[in-house]
Amino acid sequence: QPTPKSRFVGQYSLEKADPLGQGPHWQDLRATHPSMPGVQRRLRLFDMKPGASDEARELIRSAARREFMFTHGSEHPGITAPIDLVESDLGPALIFDFNEDEVPLESYLAEHGAKLGLDERLHLVRQIADTLRYAHARKLVHRALTPAQVYVRELDGVLRVSVRDWQTGRRTQGTTTAQPVSPTATSFGVGDVRDMLAHDDWVYLAPEAHQHLADVPPVPLDVFGLG
């Protein structure tokens, strides 16, 4: 997928480097603030293809709104939350802090896995579990947790884990957020989480996620993903 021709999304200037990552409906691009050249962001641009149906466009808009709404105000270091949602001619975009030291879990294990002791491995697992515990306590579920959504970095010699891509999430009943989420298509989330994942990551989903079952309890899906 080529980098978009337009060099700006909102006030952010897109760099010409290759994408930082990409999914079925988005690209992660490095962006620079126009008045603060030293400030870089990770910009997730959702792809609004020319000629796409109104239904397909609304699916993309809902994904962007969902991730911003669900994670807004989160104070847990294990949840990667966007700092802004902007609209552009190219489509909606989420703005994230950019940390060049963060790498996908699979990449980190491929390079450093053989050197990790049992305590360090358990430390990684416990951080992911603690992130899910925090989210579930606030009636938020991910529903599509795979290694592609887990990033690792070293901070002061300690491994830190963060979970991304909450666009597949949904709010469960009894939400306790300051702004209650009404039972809309946005709060209920996408019907088939596979629409938001790369095909290679489907193997990590629970069997029920492949069976189009409408009444699958969402919390066990996260527990399966943790496993």
Image (tube, rainbow, N blue to C red):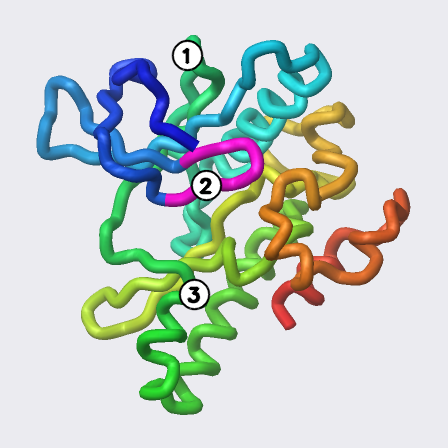
Element at label 3: helix
Tell me which amino acid carries mark 1. Ser
As measured in the structure, the alpha-carbon distance from the residue carrying label 2 to the one carrying label 3 is: 16 Å
> In the image, residue 146 lies at what x, y percent?
58, 59
Task: Give percent across and percent down for residue 45.
Answer: 43, 27
Q: Residue at x 19, y 28 (%)?
A: 32
Q: Nearer the viewer, residue 188 or 214?
A: 214
> Which secondary structure, mark 2?
strand
Looking at the image, residue 160 lies above or below residue 58: below
- Give the quarter of the figure containing the C terminus: bottom right
Q: Earlier in the sequence, mark 1 or mark 2?
A: 2
On the rendered structure, is 52 left or right of 96? right
In this figure, what is the number of numbered marks? Answer: 3
Q: Earlier in the sequence, mark 1 or mark 3?
A: 1
- Magenta-tinted stretch: 21-27
Disc 1 crowd rating (10 Å Cα; few below 14, some 14-19, many 20+) is few
Q: Mark 3 sits on what residue?
A: 105
**Residue that label 1 marks:** 88
Q: Residue 164, percent across and down?
A: 48, 48
Mark 2 highlights which residue?
22
User: Three-letter amino acid code at disc 3?
Assistant: Leu
Judged by depth in the image, the label closer to the viewer, 2 or 3, is 2
Residue plotted at (50% across, 73% down) = 126
Question: Mark 2 or mark 3: which comes first in sequence?
Answer: 2
Examine the structure image and report whether residue 141 is included in the region drawn in magenta: no
Separation of disc 1 and disc 2 at Cα? 18 Å
Crowd band around label 3 with a 10 angstrom C-alpha radius: few (<14), some (14–19), many (20+): many
Q: At label 2, which amino acid type do we have?
A: Gln
